[in-house]
Image (spheres, helix red, strand yellow):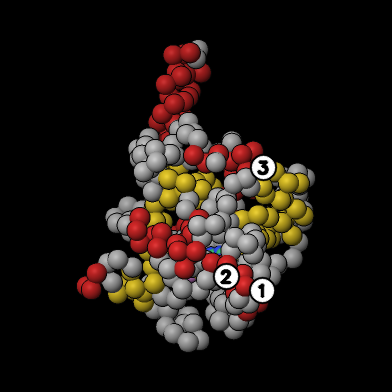
């Protein structure tokens, strides 16, 4: 599987400095120092049990002061209804799922559309680690050290046209490999969508790994979105298609229960779910005393993303 192949991180590029004319090297050095100042520190290569670790840089801008959940918590307490609705179903029932070979279909309002092999999708992107909070709409939360790259960097490669106002995403639906598809809990395949400026926001992330290892099937292998300021259901897993559209695309949870799940789904402690409060959350794995904590506006990322929604009524556009 291609994601197990080590990729070169910043440290590899620094090492090539001797081969470069000095003027270029000095400029590159400024670039590297700017990167360091911005918190892009060389990553630690953690070895996976089978030796298949990813190579990545650690982006220290995200996750300061947060203790990541254990690998065990993150990979055994999941929502991935294609494998069943129980929290332990994905870990137990995703073993037959094959995330390789994989391809991604790019469609709609973009100059470069077509079907691309996953290797070609991933090749140009240096991987970085970002520790993000994940807040599920069900009022539990976790902290996850994702490995991946900015969604904007991927989307720009397809040269979206000026008519591309939204981006729609589709999950794989393979009945022989995904036993949950036998139950019509949702209208399969799982679909999600973003306004294009949300998708291009620097926080929007494509994860291909976690804890320095390729994504386990239950977490959305081989690639999934991570949108830390939105409820977890926006972070669509195991993506097979991306479509640039002029109009707002349908989304699975909104279609299933429009009064309960909006298109935007920004984490908002001031707007309760019709059946429960969103004011507080239960941090998985935090023990009896640390477990209950207040939910923050935009899951604590308001400083970065609130301007995306300036002038919008967030009770109406929930
Ligand atoms: N295709 C698909 N994507 C999905 C889901 C799903 O059921 N199917 N569940 C969502 C929900 S509700 C959450 S909270 C997160 C959970 O991600 P995790 O299991 O990696 O923590 O995935 C989201 N992405
Ligand atoms: Mo969720």
According to the image, label 3 marks what residue? 117
Q: In the image shown, does 60 or 226 lie closer to the viewer?
A: 226
Q: Tell me which corner region of the image, top left, top right, bottom left or bottom right, holds residue 141.
A: bottom left
Instruction: Give the distance between the C-alpha atoms of the residues marked 1 and 2, in whole angstroms.
Output: 12 Å
Mark 2, other Cα within 10 Å: few <14 / some 14–19 / many ≥20: many
Where residue 153 appears, as percent x and y from the top left, is: 59, 44
CB at disc 3 and ligand 1 closer than 8 Å: no
State whether residue 304 is above or below residue 248. above
Q: Quadrant of the C terminus?
A: bottom right
Answer left or right for 177 relative to 230. Answer: right
Q: Tell me which corner region of the image, top left, top right, bottom left or bottom right, holds residue 111.
A: top right
* Badge 2 element: helix
- Image point 74% across, 65% down: which residue? 247
State whether residue 316 is above or below residue 104. below
* Badge 1 element: loop
Q: Tell me which corner region of the image, top left, top right, bottom left or bottom right, holds residue 303.
A: bottom left
Q: Quadrant of the N terminus?
A: top right
Which circle's residue, 1 or 2, is located before the other in the chain? Answer: 2
* Badge 3 element: strand
Instruction: Name the mark on residue 187.
Output: 1
Instruction: Give the distance between the C-alpha atoms of the residues marked 3 and 2, in whole angstroms.
Output: 26 Å
Which circle's residue, 3 or 2, is located before the other in the chain? Answer: 3
Where residue 216 appears, as percent x and y from the top left, is: 47, 53
Where residue 278 appears, as percent x and y from the top left, is: 42, 79
Where residue 60 appears, as percent x and y from the top left, is: 37, 45
Give the foreground label among 1 and 2.
Answer: 2
Q: In the image shown, does 63 or 303 lie closer to the viewer?
A: 63
Asked if the residue under mark 2 is in contact with the one under mark 3, i.e. CB atoms within 8 Å, the reply is no
List the single residue furthest toward the left.
289
According to the image, label 2 marks what residue? 180
């Amino acid at each position: 599987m291609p994601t197990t192949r080590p990729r070169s991180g910043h440290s590899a590029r620094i090492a090539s400095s001797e081969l470069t004319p000095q003027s270029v090297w000095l400029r590159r050095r400024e670039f590297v120092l700017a990167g360091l100042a911005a918190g892009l520190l060389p990553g630690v290569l953690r070895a996976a049990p089978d030796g298949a670790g990813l190579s990545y840089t650690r982006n220290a801008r995200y996750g300061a002061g947060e203790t990541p959940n254990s690998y065990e918590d993150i990979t055994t307490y999941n929502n991935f209804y294609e494998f069943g609705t129980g929290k332990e179903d994905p870990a137990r029932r995703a073993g037959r799922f094959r995330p390789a070979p994989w391809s991604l279909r790019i469609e709609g309002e973009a100059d470069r559309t077509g079907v691309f092999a996953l290797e070609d999708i991933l090749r140009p992107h240096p991987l970085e680690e970002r520790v993000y909070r994940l807040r599920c709409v069900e009022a539990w939360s976790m902290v996850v050290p994702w490995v991946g790259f900015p969604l904007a960097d991927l989307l720009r490669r397809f040269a979206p046209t000026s008519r591309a106002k939204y981006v729609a995403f589709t999950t794989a639906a393979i009945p022989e490999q995904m036993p949950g598809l036998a139950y019509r809990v949702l209208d399969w395949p799982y679909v999600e969508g973003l306004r294009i400026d949300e998708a291009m926001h620097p926080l929007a992330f494509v994860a291909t790994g976690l804890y320095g290892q390729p994504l386990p099937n239950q977490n959305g292998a081989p690639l999934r979105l991570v949108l830390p300021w939105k409820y977890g259901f926006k972070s669509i897993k195991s993506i097979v298609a991306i479509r640039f559209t002029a109009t707002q695309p349908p989304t699975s949870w909104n279609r299933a229960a429009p009064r309960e799940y909006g298109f935007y789904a920004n984490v908002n402690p001031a707007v309760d779910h019709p059946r429960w409060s969103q004011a507080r959350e239960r941090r998985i794995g935090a023990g009896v005393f640390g477990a209950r904590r207040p939910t923050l506006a935009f899951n604590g990322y308001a400083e970065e993303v609130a301007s995306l929604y300036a002038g919008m009524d967030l009770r109406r556009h929930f």
